[in-house]
Image: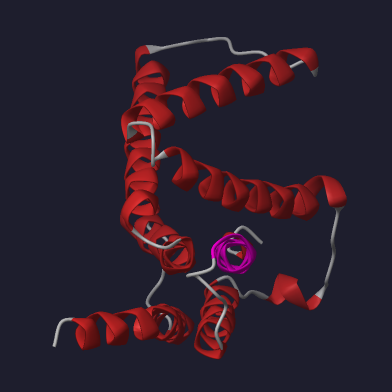
Amino acid sequence: MNATTAFFGVVLAHYVYKNDKLSPSKAIGCMIGFIGVVIVNFSTDLLNFSFRFTGEGFVIIAAFIFSATGLYAKKLTKTLDVVLITSYGLLIGGIALTLLGMIFGGKATHFTWESSSLLLYLALSSSASFYLWNWLLKYNKVGRVSVYNFLVPVFGASLSSIFLGETILEIKNLIALVLVSLGIWLVNREATARYRWANR
């Protein structure tokens, strides 16, 4: 569900930016990449389809909002520093989520050195990730960058194998990686061809 971020990014860019239109190559690349994501997440549970607005629905809404804010962040990078944009975004978002959590009864207790260290690590890694994301949007088209979100489940499966000992040496994961890579290549193929032609 979260991989729909790549779809939303490419489609929204089509309507917002004149130089980032949705071509047949991009559409096919997105579909192939999404199929790869479905394959890497495939399990027998998918045979029993279920959809809840407060579950999968919220994930899709979050993916849409993330894509929309990416477009707005790209606009802001023309006049503001990327570090400033990232800092304000995380600060405002963090305060909003904390207040919502408290309003709905959430609590943060039992802090230890281990949990605090993990929290600090997550904060730093998230900050670095969002900074790199905004920096890429500053110098590249949204459609070209968004499609790389298809790699998130692939890296998730790989890291789960390294840190959680889960088994990933399966044919479905190899097929998924090939499809995701093919999808990314198709989306970026036109831009690469134009760049080479312009530099002849």
- Say left or right for 49 vs 64: right
In the rendered view, would you say 159 is above or below 91? below
Q: Quadrant of the C terminus?
A: bottom left
- Say left or right for 25 vs 167: right
Check if residue 16 falls in the magenta segment.
yes
Viewer-proximal residue among 88 and 163: 88
In the rendered view, would you say 3 is above or below 78? below
Percent x, y for residue 152?
45, 60
Viewer-proximal residue among 189 and 120: 189
Q: Residue at x 32, y 30 (%)?
A: 83
- Say left or right for 8 vs 155: right
In the rendered view, would you say 29 is above or below 7? below
The residue lying furthest to the left in this view is 200
Percent x, y for residue 184?
41, 77
Q: Quadrant of the N terminus?
A: bottom right
Percent x, y for residue 68?
62, 49
Q: Residue at x 60, y 68 (%)?
A: 7
> Magenta region's main secondary structure?
helix
Question: How has the structure been colored for display?
Answer: secondary structure
In the rendered view, would you say 185 is above or below 69? below
Query: Picture quarter containing residue 69?
Result: top right
Check if residue 98 falls in the magenta segment.
no
The count of marks equals 0
Q: Which residues are magenta?
A: 6-17
Percent x, y for residue 24?
56, 89
